[in-house]
Image (spheres, rainbow, N blue to C red):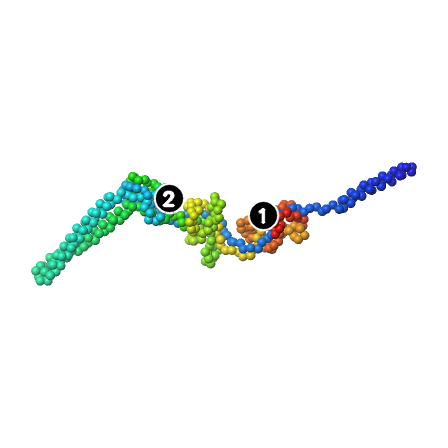
Amino acid sequence: MKTSRSLLIMTIALALLAGGPACSRRKKAPPAPGSPVTVAAAQQKDVPLELGAVGRVEAIQTVGVKALVGGEVTRVYFKEGQPVRKGDILFTIDPRPFEIALKQAESQVERDRAQLRNAETDLARYTDLVRKDYVTKEQYDALAANRDVLVATVKADEAVVANARLNLDYATVRSPIDGRTGALFIDAGNIIKANDTNPAVVIDQMSPIYVAFAVPEENLEPIRTFQAAAPLTTEAVPETQTAAPVAGVLTFIDNAVDVTTGTITLKATFENRDLVLWPGQFLNVRLTLTTEKGVVAVPSQAVQTGQAGAYVYVVKEDMTAEMRPVKVARAYGEDSVIASGLKAGERVVTDGQLRLYPGAKVEIKAGTEPGRGA
């Protein structure tokens, strides 16, 4: 009996000794870690107010070169796609027919000038004779009329000479603008017609150059307002190019809104000295209206959308998450401009929001806290 009681007491004692450390361990267990998140600080900075659109490059001048006289093309002085300057010779037409026509016209005018000189001499002589009544007044008037006819004839001859000389000049076809040639539609040895339906070559002005784009009509009034204060900077970003955007200036606002699309057409002028922009090319356009000073901006991935609207998770000093409603004014690049609900310097969660709820403990991932590394 005593032995059984002793065994029971020893068993209870051993159980107490075994359970004691386990209870101590449960009481001293560390608290559960917070949800790992990435954060960024809301920044107060100057942010441009921009409009975005898809634009198309247009040549300011496009000239279809046609011959003004017909004949055989004797020589072509350029290659397709070659840049040319205003006044450069493009091709020549056989000048011999025009040289002959010019010589004939010059001979005719010299003959009629000689006749005019003779008529003026006769008229001068008859002037004295008519005063002395040696000739009749009718004879004098006939000589005067003949002189006037010859004056008019010489003027007509001089016009023929000028036209013949002009046709000879037209036999040398020159570039009317600075630009780049396109495909050539006639070769040396072919016969070209004067003012043919199709041009021999098309030349596009490359520098400066236009970029045309359209924006919704509700933007017309702010565009006009800001343009009245200062020229509006425009940036063109070719879709296939990784280089820096090309800078230009807004120079044209169409005089009417397109009623079918509700948009207004704009054009910006770019110097394009490096020929980055090419006629017909499509690209992205950013029109800067103004720069807003001291606005609050956060990375756009920090902004979430719920049933009540946009919100962000703010990390408080006690490392808990606060669900903060915000009003987003607009997006700029990778940032969102916050109109209300957030102050500069507050930490917002940019990654890990799905594991959060109001009051949830958070743990900022190493190296991502603002001001403490990359």
Q: Is residue 340 left or right of residue 207?
A: right
Q: Is residue 288 left or right of residue 12?
A: left
Label 2 sits on what residue type? Answer: Gln
Work out whether 175 lies above or below 130.
Answer: above
Query: Residue 208's spot in the image, x, y percent?
Result: 41, 50
- Which numbered marker is on residue 358? none
Can the viewer see residue 279 in this picture? yes
Residue at the far bottom in the pictured view: 131
Q: Which residue is mark 1?
A: 301
Can the viewer see residue 224 in this picture? no
- Which numbered marker is on residue 82? 2
Q: Quadrant of residue 185?
A: top left
- Which numbered disc, 1 or 2, marks the residue closer to the eye? 2
Residue at 50%, 52% (x, y): give it: 50
Of 86 and 66, nearer the camera is 86
Report crowding for label 1: few under 14, some 14 to 19, many 20 or more residues within 10 A (C-alpha). Answer: some
Work out whether 64 lies above or below 224.
Answer: above
Residue at 38%, 43% (x, y): give it: 81
For label 2, the SS is: loop
How many badges with numbers are in the image?
2
Residue at 48%, 52% (x, y): give it: 287
Label 1 sits on what residue type? Answer: Gln
Quadrant of image for the N terminus: top right
